[in-house]
Amino acid sequence: MKRAFFTGLIMALGLGWLAAGAAEQKPNIILVLVDDMGWGDLGLNQPKEHADTPKIDTPTLDRLATQGAQLQRHYTCAPVCAPARASLFTGLHQGHAEVIRNNSFDAALENGHTLATVLKQAGYSTALIGKWGIGGGQESGGTPATCPAWPTKRGFDFFFGYNNHLAGHRHYPKEESNADPETHRNAVWDGDEMITDKLDGCYCTDLFTARAKKWIVDQQKADKSKPFFLALTHVAPHARLGIPAGEYPAGGGLNGGVQWLGEPGKMINTARPDSWDTFIHPQYRNAWQEYAQARYGNNAAHKLMTARRHASMITRVDESLGDLVQLCQDLGIADNTIIIFTSDNGAHDEPGAVGGFAGHPAPAQDPSFFRSYGNHDGIKRDVFDGGLRVPCVVYAPGIIKQGLVSNTPTQFQDWMATVCDLADVPVPARCDGRSLLPLLQGNDTLSQDPARVLYAEYAFGGGMAQYRDYAANKPGRTRGEQQVLIFFDNRSGRWLKALRTGVKTGQEKWEIYDTETDPHESTPLPESENAAMQEHITNLALWNRRAYDYHRAPQAPARRNACGGFRSYDMNLVPAVTTQASGTGLLKQQMKATAPWVPAAAITADAPCTVESPNGAVLPAGTITTYTGYINVPADGNHWHFYLTLSDVPGTKAFVKLHNFNLVDADFNYIPGSTATESSAANTVELNAEKTGKKGIPLSKGLHPITITVVQGESAAGTLKLEWNRGPHNGKQTERTLIPAESFLPAES
């Protein structure tokens, strides 16, 4: 299916680059993200040893999984919604998140590449329908005029839904209590219009599905040849366990299922203000009584009420998904559409910020009822697999291998690389992920990749929730700073997971688990294996993430308006590698080509290699150049700063990686001729520019792998200049100097 992107000279964006894909229709992409659905809430994931556990009916998801692909070890980047969504949409794991970390709800997503920006530039129509929560509403709502990261400012052509994450806890925007002191509504936006007052009795799962169907139909009417990307981000099954007002309409697709009517007071065909929040799915109304009584005793009635609501919400999502699939079939686009279904994190145990109403309770779901965590331990906010491993089903009958069940570990940042692969555009250098398309097509190149590391970090106070089917090592477990790496161990030929909780110094011991043989993460590897791996894992963590400046703009009024992600290990020195290297300069590969952004893999394997120092080297017009090798850091320092300056030639941009972390981003927002630094200020709107740049990169003395990729503008040749300083030393600021040629050493060709 795929075409080679770098074939000779690739014309500039908007000319030959887009024309190169004209001969083959690019696939439509539908990303369905649900909120707080546990891995075990998908019936296919319930293990045989828990045959007594009730299962939620998801016939559509079951069918799509068996006819498509199941990613059984798919991980979110954080066990709570805002950072998970930020990582999903940017292709960055949490070790590279510049703004949205921990619980920085409603902070403004940094202005960099997103799934929508790359697909929009690839010729796609783009829409986000549902919950956003990362627009910069500062936990008070926000409007298109006041939010710096409104979806239409992050690559989406169209937005319908909740910007405010607290409003997104409401399943009936008009009927439920107000969560938005700025707009005094649970603000649902249709483009730039707030339409909450028109949404009488509208259940959000139905509302978002109906609006999504209308948008898809409108796109097909406008231009069938133009591919589309739809992010449909449901609020179910999170929060108040709000349930529908009636049964799901029969049929589905163009003429059945939920339908957008667009009439105030009757915006969708299931709007029933007189019976809102009343419909338990018929198959659950009298279900599970004996099970509940045996497991919960005197509390059985309450547990049954919450379970029936939770199950009804998930079955409703399943019905809506079937409606969308039918629509694609009716429009004749099913064979060229890929549907990705997943959840932002593990199952929740919280009622959300909504009080109860008469006849409309606000209970918390008990994840133990359905074993929503499957045969794992942990829930939302935990870094054990119950909190991080999420259900993932991919359906694309004309694109991927049918009936695929993969146990290869994958993570949210991989979707950026995957959609770029589907759209036949390069993966941005900033992206941490790898394309899953080969895996989905039956050619798994990731299953034994020692260079691949999945990473997560998250901080939250208090202890884990406790359930009786957890392993014995969970009671009394605190959260605090939590950190996770999932990596392939060459010696044993298996994927391992290393984690630590309650981190205070970054020197704590890692717990290492083989989650395939020990899904409950109950017994770490024996000390004979464990001890030998501790230093290596600590190094992996430091080589795959970095610290940013977390200073907040003084005018930002938000309670948790991002930039609060300082980690206790941020200033631990990144260790040098023990590789021996000799010579002067870096390995250089260059080809005549252009790209719309700095690509992650710019050079073909057979490109000629030379060795030269990058500083001052002439970069011919219309080329992509990659330098690889090592930089020799002369001394330990907690605040090494780097400064990259490119010639003032339109279209010129660059990206620098050190080890596997992002060092200097001179790509998305870069102005040719200016100087970019290691600071995160270039991609954010909420940081105080006068305070950023104070925190540098902590580096040990010695060799550090470096990759520099430059896209040189087509109108003229140019050069690059890379400088550094050590930061404060002996009470004085060190001088910023050009990195000398002898500090660069080539990698093997």
Image: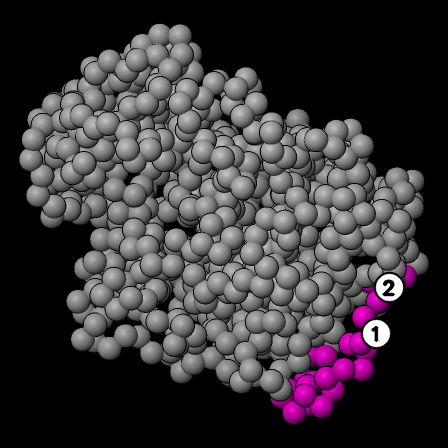
- At horizontal 93% and vertical 58% (from top left) the residue drawn is 274
Instruction: Please indicate whether residue 228 sits to the left or right of residue 631 in the image.
Output: right
Instruction: Please indicate whether residue 110 sits to the left or right of residue 447 in the image.
Output: right
Residue range (magenta): 275-304
- At horizontal 90% and vertical 43% (from top left) the residue drawn is 261
Q: Relative to residue 593, is residue 176 depicted above or below?
A: below
The main secondary structure of the magenta stretch is: helix
Residue 725 image offset from top left, x and y in percent: 18, 27
Observer-nearest of 399 and 638: 399
Q: Relative to residue 222, is residue 441 depicted above or below?
A: below
Question: Which quadrant would the N terminus be assigned to in this image?
Answer: top right
Look at the numbered discs 1 and 2 and tell me whether their residues touch, using CB distance below 8 Å.
yes
> Is residue 671 in view from this perspective?
no
Amino acid residing under circle 1: Pro
Which residue lies under the disc numbered 2? 247
- Quadrant for residue 443, please give it: bottom left
User: Of the residues under marks 1 and 2, which one precedes in the sequence?
Assistant: 2
Instruction: Please indicate whether residue 453 sits to the left or right of residue 112 in the image.
Output: left
Disc sitting over residue 282 in the figure? 1
Mark 1, residues whose alpha carbon is within 10 Å: few (<14), some, or many (≥20)?
few
- At horizontal 21% and vertical 45% (from top left) the residue drawn is 574
Q: CA distance from mark 1 to mark 2?
A: 9 Å
Observer-nearest of 691 and 711: 711
